[in-house]
Amino acid sequence: MKIALAQINTTVGDLAGNEAKIQAGAARARSEGVDVVLFPELTITGYPPRDLVLKKDFIAGNLAVLQRLAAASGPTAMLVGYVGENKNPPGRDVTNEAALLQNGKIVATRVKSLLPTYDVFDEDRYFEPAQSNAPVSIANQKCGVTICEDIWNDEDFWPQRRYRANPVGELLAAGASHIFQHLRLALARWQGKAARRYDRQPGAQIRPPGGRVQSRRGQ
């Protein structure tokens, strides 16, 4: 599988500007003949949108951008972050999501499971978490799609975990052969058993400028 990492510099609240950057990144990926291009977490809105997600017109505008991006998509798949609507009330009105776009359609969407609410992060205040996750098909491969915090809860990496769920472990157990990760932060490295466990698992991570972008190749 040929993967492109579109490390674009989004601006919080600038839906039009972010859309233009996504379109430019997608066009470059198509010209390179890749199978899938990854964009950072909450690409359309910028991160963190905070109280903007309380404005219905802002949510509608971000969903309109998603529809335009989907309509413009071709054989090269795109993984784009956006603010979705909670389809399973009760709970918070919106979700932190990633959409798989291809051939003029929204092929699949996945919701962030683990919402950080510590230090500078207050995602649990705004977003409803996913209840489950499952692999999606990209280039005839079974792929797991995770969003930032979802990958940072391995029992062998953290001596004391913040969450009960381990989305990456669940995706691998469901047969995912690749793990794609939308980021807003990146840890320097995984260590010990966690690194060894996932060492042979192909995957890619993408975040905005200012930090690391990683890809990992199965051996």
Image (cartoon, helix red, strand yellow):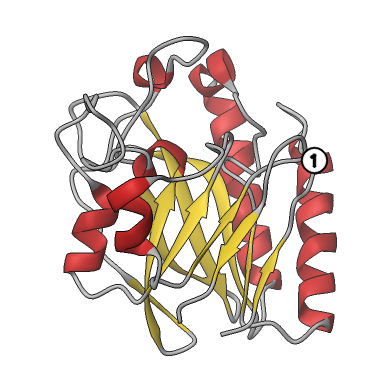
Q: At label 1, which amino acid type do we have?
A: Asn
Position in image of residue 60 (x %, y %):
56, 37
Q: Tell me the quarter of the image containing the N terminus.
A: bottom right
Which residue lies under the disc numbered 1?
9
User: 122 or 196: nearer the eye?
Assistant: 196
Residue sitting at the far top? 119
Report the number of numbered marks.
Answer: 1
Disc 1 crowd, CA 10 A, few/some/many (<14, 14-19, 20+): some
Name above or below for residue 109 compared with residue 210.
below
Q: Quadrant of residue 157?
A: top left
Position in image of residue 125 (x %, y %):
37, 14
Left or right side of 186 for 131:
left
Secondary element under disc 1, as helix, strand or loop, is: loop
Position in image of residue 205 (x %, y %):
56, 55
Left or right side of 150 for 106:
right
Name above or below for residue 144 compared with residue 15.
below
Which residue is drawn at the image coordinates 65% and 70% (left, top)?
71
